[in-house]
Amino acid sequence: MNTKLFTLLTLLLCGVNSAISQELNNNYTKEELIKIRKSKSYLNSVSEKGTSNDQTPYLWEYVIDNNPNGNEEFSFCDAKELSNGNIGVASSFYYRSGYGDFYSAHPAVAVISRDGEEIARNSFFRPGYTTTSSAPYLFEKEGKLFALSTYSPEHDYLSFNYFQNYADHPGDARLVLSKLDDELNIVKNHEHCFTIDTFEKRGWEQWEYMPNENSGNICLFSAFEDEGNIIGAFFKIVSLDYENPRGHDSLFLFRMNYDGEIIDIKSYERESHGGFMQAYLRRNQMIKTDSLYILYESYYTNYWHGRIWYFDKQLDHIATRLMRHCDYPPDAGIIEPLKDLSVIKDNNGITYLSTTANNITNHHSSEYNDSRLYKLNDDLESTSEGTPIPIINYIIRGSSTARDHSPNINSIDIAPNNTLYYACNYNVWENIQWCVIERLDSDLDSIRTLYYDKNINSLKALDNGDLMVNNGKSIAIFPATVFGFEPDNIEEAHAHGLHLAVAYPNPGGDVMNIRTGLRNAVLTVYDINGRKIHEQEITDDVTSVDASGWQSGTYIWKLGIRNEELGMKEVESGKWVK
């Protein structure tokens, strides 16, 4: 059934209590509530429109065509290659709320063909409910698509779907496995209900701007297939009330078959008492070995930054280990825990973990962040209680003058020949953004570094080695060959909208930085009249150029590499504004 028609019929049949939906909070007017919500960039970021560069040829790029009236949003979250070569996209769907933003999410799915054409798209609205998980997890079984989602009561007070607007308003949260047909209609739902805390801390600003995350909910943050069943993990979170704590949150691990039956489920009470746990929960925080499930999570203390839980195949907790960021100076103070966390094991059993961390130079300010990639030895026999798990190697990406993050859904994947794809977003929340995408060898040395002209949410390696990237509003696929290291791949990278170097900050001041993976290259800078004003060799990932003596204006920079037969060959260029 059409989603909008279903919504309208539901509201008519359930009898929305308009008096409740119009009633204002005792402590805030509607205008004050809207001001609180709009002041939070986390909420506003959902409604930013993606743009498509028609001059950028990819293998293909698909850009979402959202509702032109601006009252609905469809947003991509994570994608996977299906057995027939098509792309299944786990997504979220939003209606504009009474606050004016796109806040409360509903599970959604899209399928795009191997040629970049939309095949189907659907969202799964449920009266009185929202989802506080990032998006459904997609699975395939005998050619059929399944979506694993969660639903929790909708606490967005000015939304038409506010849970108390319904006469029989929900008091539970639900874990739902949906079998879908080729048009993404639900063939059958398998549902499991969990009693949830619906207390609301009305009048408290922290609750008012994020009511769904600060009220009772369940958040699914990892799920994958193992031995023909689905293994998943979610938190059951109580409503937040600092003055009168309402109990403890719980971690649930479960094993479910494709008939929707929960075969095993175990719960573990946590020390926390509610709150915005989604700030540190993503989608890829649990990995499997032949005998274990290993769960990585943020852990906030002055000394430790991550906690690792080991479970046997019966979902019993058998050990806990700790993780600490390395190489911060002694005066660093409190370093933020693991966030924007992605973890993966390669074909040799080595674990790689990507995370956003405090900037190594400006570590005292939350305005500056880096992305880190760790190579870990998390073998249980190689670690002991109270000591950090061994870090074999690590790399840091980011600048000391900007907010740079790991993509918030997934930033690492296994590339051909057991190499890695790895990404870092630069200038997050600024007007000019880009993403550094690298192919790394197993020692974390860069084989090829390329620059994409927008931030991304996730990346995924396809079976043939091509790379798929997603920025929420579009999905693009780049051929694996542009991430090789042969010189003739430079032209191919350019042809697919990727670059070998970037100048930043742009516009800038007294320093122009050039970041590139090239070596033995020459940087040349010209003024707007074509006069050469600077030239130097490139020997490091980042080259800083003193521009303090340059006049304000636009400059052209070029990178060249020496060729024995052709002499100097230009491989990259761009404009920089002082």
Image: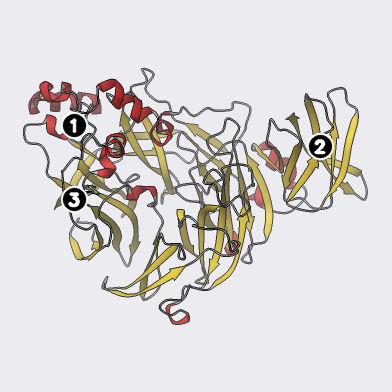
**Residue 558 disc label:** 2
Up the image or down, 135 lies above or below 245; here it is above
Residue drawn at (78%, 24%), measured in percent from left and top?
A: 553
Q: Which residue is mark 1?
A: 162
Q: Which residue is mark 3?
A: 244
Position of residue 51 measured from the top left corner of the image (x, y, whole percent): 52, 27
> How busy is the neighbourhood of tag 1: few (under 14 within 10 Å), some, or many (20 plus)?
many
Position of residue 423 measured from the top left corner of the image (x, y, whole percent): 57, 49
> CA separation, marks 1 and 3?
24 Å
The amino acid sitting under disc 3 is: Asn
Q: Can residue 171 be seen at all in this image of the molecule?
A: yes
Q: Earlier in the sequence, mark 1 or mark 2?
A: 1
Position of residue 185 measured from the top left corner of the image (x, y, whole percent): 25, 38
Mark in the foreground, 1 or 3: 3
Up the image or down, 487 lies above or below 253; here it is above
Could you say whether the residue bearing mark 1 is in a helix, strand or loop? loop
**Residue 298 location, quadrant:** bottom left
Q: Earlier in the sequence, mark 3 or mark 2?
A: 3
Could you say whether the residue bearing mark 3 is in a helix, strand or loop? loop
Could you say whether the residue bearing mark 2 is in a helix, strand or loop? strand
**Position of residue 41 in the picture relative to residue 33 (left or right):** right
> How busy is the neighbourhood of tag 2: few (under 14 within 10 Å), some, or many (20 plus)?
some
